[in-house]
Image (spheres, coloured by chain):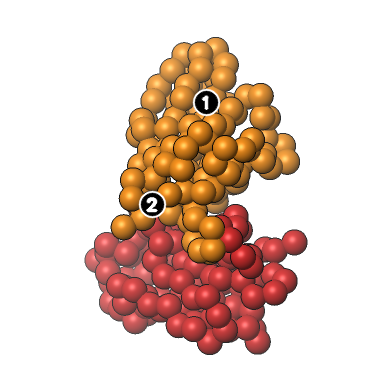
Chain colours: A orange, B red
Amino acid sequence: GAVVSQHPSWVICKSGTSVKIECRSLDFQATTMFWYRQFPKQSLMLMATSNEGSKATYEQGVEKDKFLINHASLTLSTLTVTSAHPEDSSFYICSGGTSGIREQFFGPGTRLTVL
Amino acid sequence: GDSVTQMEGPVTLSEEAFLTINCTYTATGYPSLFWYVQYPGEGLQLLLKATKADDKGSNKGFEATYRKETTSFHLEKGSVQVSDSAVYFCALSGAGGAQKLVFGQGTRLTINP
């Protein structure tokens, strides 16, 4: 149980375009979803936390107008990278959590390459 | 604020060697502690966890004991295999609800046959 999927698993886009990444909890209701960014050979950096039906809370230094997060249902959250540039190339990982449980369930990640 | 410090890598061992990856933490209250493993090109998988002092988490031959007195959660395995090659992350979660995780910097482990 507690499976999280991400789509797409990898994407290549041109500079200036927008890219949407979906994160779905397949067998549980994720009241909270988290979005992370991971650079090569580095740890995960939390970008934002979103609760279903509420605006996301962004970590310091993360541009909320560039990284749009929507958590419209208990099973789906999306991250849209707007006007992507090569420096946005990274591995993006989402996770879902449920109230009362101190554990997050991670998706497999999406590798974004911006040309 | 809460923080996690992991043993720096990379770590390279021979197959069947004993493994220890050190992890210490700083947190208020009583956090839950986790070890996650990341295989190349993949997301994170929970390896084991412990939610209170003196708990021992175990999975796939790996073990870690929640030591409050030393604020540690060291990962151990008695005999590693080539398939254990991956990056290992120690993490903590604060009290209450689906709190955000604080990760250590990760330790890259390579096992040679």
Between B90 and B20, the one lying in front of the other is B90
**Amino acid under disc 2:** Phe
Picture quarter containing residue A68?
top right
- Local packing at callout 2 (Cα closer than 10 Å; few below 14, some 14-19, many 20+) is some
- Residue, x 57% and y 37% (percent of image)? A53
Does A37 sit above or below residue B86?
A: above
**Amino acid under disc 1:** Thr
Name the secondary structure under disc 1.
strand
Q: Can residue A105 be seen in this view?
A: yes
Does B71 sit above or below residue A64?
A: below
Chain under numbered label 1 = A
Q: Which mark is residue A43?
A: none
Residue B101 x/y as whole percent: 58, 57
Report how far apart the C-alphas of labels 2 and 1 lie in the structure: 23 Å
Chain under numbered label 2 = A
- Residue, x 39% and y 25% (percent of image)? A11
Viewer-side label of 2, 1: 2
Does B5 sit above or below residue A12?
A: below
Q: Earlier in the sequence, mark 2 or mark 1?
A: 2
Q: Residue A28 carries which label?
A: 2
Q: Mark 1 points at which residue?
A: A80
Residue A40 x/y as whole percent: 49, 42
Between A107 and A12, the one lying in front of the other is A107
Name the secondary structure under disc 2.
loop
Residue A85 x/y as whole percent: 56, 20
